[in-house]
Amino acid sequence: MKYYSTNKIGKEATLQQAVVKGLASDKGLFMPEQIKTLPQSFFDNIENLSFQEIAYVVADAFFGEDVDAESLKEIVYDTLSFDAPIVKVTENIYSLELFHGPTLAFKDVGARFMSRLLGYFIKKEGTENVNVLVATSGDTGSAVANGFLGVKGIRVFVLYPKGKVSPIQECQFTTLGQNITALEIDGTFDDCQALVKNAFMDEDLNKKHKLTSANSINVARFLPQAFYYFYAYAQLKKLGKEKEMVVCVPSGNFGNITAGLFGKKMGLPIKRFIASNNANDIFFNYLQTGEYNPRPSIATLANAMDVGDPSNFARILDLYNNDVNAIRNEISGARYSDEEIASTMNTCRKETNYILDPHGACGYQALKDGLKENEIGVFLETAHPAKFLEKVEEILNEKIKIPEKLQSFMKGTKQSIEMSKDFESFKSFLMKI
Ligand SMILES: *Cc1c(COP(=O)(O)O)cnc(C)c1O
């Protein structure tokens, strides 16, 4: 399969090039030149298949031309060693719980898949050793570090702002060792991101190292997120509730929802999508006005969605030929303030007993507000509430049980390298490794 750039200037790439480079040479995002439709027989029988079996069919449509069947199956089965169950919250609303992986957030799926696919290219195709640079305000760093832990031929550098990441999140990428290095930057998240961007553009560094990113611009991280949309459908079908399925996605960089839109293009019978924003409502405003006006992000309770210029917006435009009405036909928007998020978490806890995290709360409330008669809504519960322990306990005024997986990270010893936010010190560090 060939991958073209959303900017349509640079050359097409192979899957291997797209994964190793991350971003196209014209700074656009890679898109597969073809999106295959899956046969009706697959959907007729989907409720009888396991998560791994379903995911393999989807993965084969994306990557089957470029990865041999046995290896691809191994990558998929190894990635999905945990479940993604739907849980009934109200009569017509289900939570798709994407927090049963190693770091308790949906990013585990894409990060694990990407690490294994890169590992495959390094081993089978002789790709040189690769260095993954990732800037994080919390969730991405932990998913990527754990996803890539112990994968041969790959080193990961997690850059995070000193003192601005919660202790629970910090321990998930500073206690691992092996091929994972945590760089504690004396600056903000934006400073970390700027360091990574500058490194990708630096000639000396690119001569010395293969550098790639592991955020949702990378096709190997974002496409596998389509897997659980199919699995959610299968689970609803088993209950006989799949006829008018509406999926609501708490969105920041819009990688997650874009994977769902790919699923729909492949024939998955989702009636429509809702993209739910926090106060960073750039996409919401775009749907209202037809104009895209990025702006600096503001800090909210749902901080993994604090994005002022969603990187995957370019992919959505490309999927719908820049036609805002075509986009409006399939996606509607919602947005919630911190006050509304907190009130949703409280009300949901009281009325249904279900504990939402601040991101999932945006998804749940958008379904409450926007579902029509006969529709069944599924929202993506993108992280476990214990990942945002202090905030959730304060809002709900109760103690949250910390899952075993999180507790074991908290027992590890922190290892990190402190660094200033100027590029020269980061560069000289990378030139010496
Ligand atoms: C990353 C993240 C999101 C946003 O996902 P996008 O793909 O960037 O839209 C939502 N919730 C949580 C918990 C996240 O970590």
Image (cartoon, rainbow, N blue to C red):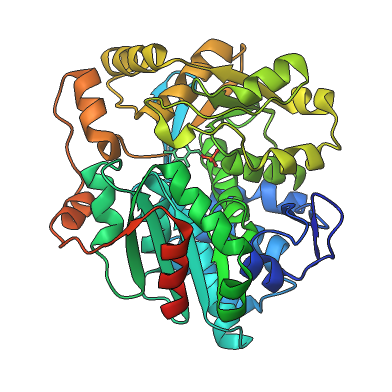
Instruction: Say above or below: 204 vs 362.
Output: below
Kindly identify the residue that appears in the image at 85 percent across and 29 percent down.
Answer: 323
Give x and y (percent) for residue 23.
67, 58
Instruction: Say above or below: 331 vs 189.
Output: above
Kindly identify the residue that appears in the image at 62 percent across and 12 percent down.
Answer: 372
Q: Quadrant of residue 201?
A: bottom right
- Left or right: residue 84 versus residue 220 is left
Kindly identify the residue that appears in the image at 22 percent across and 64 percent down.
Answer: 415
Camera-side residue of 351 and 138: 138
- Left or right: residue 245 versus residue 348 is right
Q: Quadrant of the N terminus?
A: bottom right
Number of marks: 0
Q: Quadrant of residue 16?
A: bottom right
Camera-side residue of 153 and 226: 153
Kindly identify the residue that appears in the image at 69 percent across and 53 percent down.
Answer: 42
Instruction: Say above or below: 294 vs 77.
Output: above
Instruction: Say above or below: 6 vs 247.
Output: below
Camera-side residue of 425 and 210: 425
Camera-side residue of 130 and 189: 189
Give x and y (percent) for residue 52.
51, 60
Q: Quadrant of the C terminus?
A: bottom left
Q: Is residue 369 visible?
A: yes
Give x and y (percent) for residue 386.
25, 38
Q: Is residue 50 visible?
A: no
Give x and y (percent) for residue 297.
51, 29
